[in-house]
Every structure is written in C-alpha cells, then in structure tokens.
Image (cartoon, rainbow, N blue to C red):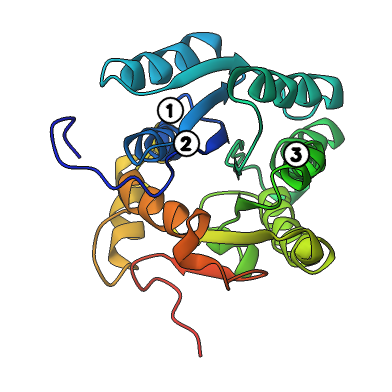
Amino acid sequence: MAAMESRSQRFAQRAAIVTGAGQGIGRAIALRLAREGAAVVVADLNAAQARSTAAAIEAEGLQARDVVVDVTDAADVKSMVASAVQFYGGVDVLVNNAGVLRSTAVAGISPEEWDLVLNVNLKGAFLCAQAVLEPMIARNGGRIVNMASMAGRATSTLGGAHYTAAKAGVLGLSRHLAREWAPHKINVNAVCPGIVDTPMVRESIDEERMTRVLAAIPFSRLADPDEIASLVCFLASDEAAYITGASVDIHGGEMIIQ
C-alpha cells in the first residue's frame, strides 16, 4: 500500500505492539497497523531491523517507536510493555509474531535447539500475552493475535519437530487465553499461514526444494507478507469483535480440510 493512498482509520487512537517486527511478516503487520491509524511499538531482538521498520513508518508521517526485546526473557518483555504504556498510554493490540525456524531432523535436535525453538515461538507468546493482560484490562479490552502456522495444524513443511510442536502449542495457548480472558473483553485468535515469502524462509530452502514446495501449493506461489498482515489486522479490528479462540488458515490451498 503506497503512502499516499487513502487509509482506513480503524485503529485510530489505539496502541499496538508487534514482536518480530524487524522484517518479513512482522514488518508488514507493523506497517499496515500504522497505516490504519495505530501507534505502533516495533519490537525485535535485532535493533537495526527494528529501527528500520520504525523509520519506514515514521517516513510516512505515522507513529512508531522501536524497542529491542528478547521475548524469551520475562523482564525484557515486561519492560517492552511498560515502554508501550509510557509511549502511548496503554496497549490495545498485541501481535505475537516473533519466531525462529530450524529444520533439523528429530535425531539431530539437541536439547538446546529444542529449547530455543520452543522458547521463542511458544514461551515468548505466553510471556507477551501475560504482560499485556493488565494494560488491556485497564483499556476495557483488547486484541491478541498469535502467529501460529500450518505446522501447528498438521506438520511443518520446512521446520523440524520442535517447530511443529511449538506452533501446535501456540494454537492451544490461544484457545485457552480466549476462554479465560473473554470476561475481560480480550479477544485472542491465531493465524495459521502456510509458507510465506520472508527472509527466514528464503534462508532455509534451496531452489530445488522451492520448486517442489510450489508444486504442492494449488496457487503455485508463496504467500506475500502483506496478505498475512491483512488477515492479522482484520482479527485485531472491531470487525472481528465476535471472533475469539479461532485459528484461521491462510495457505493458498496447501492444506484443505473439512
């Protein structure tokens, strides 16, 4: 979406945190939220990438602040949320997008690699959600969108067993939070993308394997990060006020189930 295009203001007067917002899907989500009126906290472990996304938002005359965060560290996460409250007065939207992908076969997964993948993808989502609970209650509700994966609904195409397990855990966490926090008017949903054209994916697949992957997708292409951002923003908006505990697939038909 070009900077000069007319924009929806469905997130006007709302503050959003997007983790893993330095590149790929997270960057697309942060940009879309800002273009639709949100004041965005661009959170990422990589300081330069977080600054790059925030600068891109600011260049369009929109609101963004960049924060360096390790989502596996509870103190770091609390500091991130405290910064959001300091910057914007509260938190209305949390997008748990931070993640890592490892493709190691089961026999080769070390305990350290298992912990890394589970901690970033699952524990990180839990810690961030836990940290925004009180600020969202103070705002009389909020929206949490967790980045799961088609891997959590079936098995991973590119990742290992630890990635599959982590993303399945994200789906379970999303359902539980949705039920437990409904009295607080906090909607919690998950998005299940197939393979998205991101730097993380491009780094994990060679040309030959990419050809095989595309052959298995009815649309014969990878998802664009902006397509994932569109779905995330819908779930974070008032248009989805009666949707909670859902997992929404977006994979170009790669896994069509009844």
Of the 4 image quadrants, the one containing the N terminus is: top left
Measure the alpha-carbon separation of dots 3 and 2: 18 Å
Crowd rating for badge 2 (residues with CA inside 10 Å; few <14, some 14–19, many 20+): many
Instruction: Judge whether 229 appears above or below 115 on screen.
Output: below
Q: Which mark is residue 132?
A: 3
Which amino acid type is shown beneath numbered disc 3? Val
Residue at 34%, 41% (x, y): give it.
36
Furthest residue toward left:
4
Q: Nearer the viewer, mark 3 or mark 2?
A: 3
Say which quarter of the image contains residue 198: top left
Q: Position of residue 256 (x, y in %)?
A: 44, 81
Which amino acid type is shown beneath numbered disc 1? Gln
Residue at 25%, 21% (x, y): give it.
60
Q: Position of residue 185 (x, y in %)?
A: 71, 61
Which amino acid type is shown beneath numbered disc 2? Gly
Q: As drawn, is 165 to the left or to the right of 46?
A: right
Q: Nearer the viewer, mark 1 or mark 3?
A: 3
| Number of marks in the rendered image | 3
Measure the alpha-carbon separation of dots 1 and 3: 23 Å
Measure the alpha-carbon separation of dots 2 and 1: 6 Å
Q: Which residue is mark 2?
A: 26
Say which quarter of the image contains residue 57: top left
